[in-house]
Amino acid sequence: MAIGERLVSIICIRRSDQLFVYKNSCPHTGVNLEWLPDQFLDTTQQYLVCSTHGALFQVEDGHCVAGPCAGDALQKVTATIKNRECFVDSDSILNVVHS
């Protein structure tokens, strides 16, 4: 997603009727999480995993449950689903960009 001249990578995960959206940035190192393009989940499909150091994040709240950033959390982005498309709240993404 482009905000001005800055590109912001986000993660969108849908579980049943719920949508979970986070800034694609590990709170420990700032690197993107995916280990392959669009591959964010661990082998059990239960947690988001950081490809750099294996930190595990709960999908439902972004809370890190294992790894060097245990206790930290991913930055949440407010979004909705309309007609099978994800729409990100502009104020929410601006807060993520500036933090």
Image (spheres, rainbow, N blue to C red):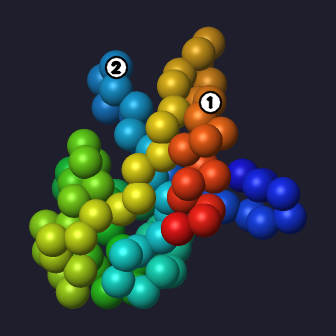
Q: Residue, x 21% and y 86% (percent of image)?
A: 68
Gap in angstroms between the C-alphas marked 1 and 2: 15 Å
Q: Which mark is residue 87?
A: 1
Q: Which mark is residue 98?
A: none
Viewer-proximal residue, 13 or 62? 62
Q: Secondary structure at mark 2?
A: loop
- Quarter where residue 55 is shown: bottom left
Callout 2 crowding tier (Cα within 10 Å): few <14, some 14–19, many ≥20: few
- Quarter where residue 62 is shown: bottom left
Q: Residue, x 36% and y 62% (percent of image)?
A: 74
Viewer-proximal residue, 76 or 17? 76
Q: Is residue 71 above or below residue 54?
A: above
**How far across and down, in percent of the image, does residue 39 sit?**
47, 60
Q: Which residue is mark 2?
A: 17
Callout 1 crowding tier (Cα within 10 Å): few <14, some 14–19, many ≥20: few
**How far across and down, in percent of the image, does residue 25 sit?**
48, 70
As drawn, is 26 to the left or to the right of 38?
A: left
Q: Secondary structure at mark 1?
A: strand
Q: Mark 1: which amino acid?
A: Phe
Q: Residue, x 78% and y 66% (percent of image)?
A: 6
Viewer-proximal residue, 63 or 53? 63
**Of callouts 1 and 2, which one flags the residue occurring earlier in the amino acid sequence?**
2
Residue 97 visible: yes
Q: Mark 2: which amino acid?
A: Asp
Q: Is residue 85 above or below residue 98?
A: above
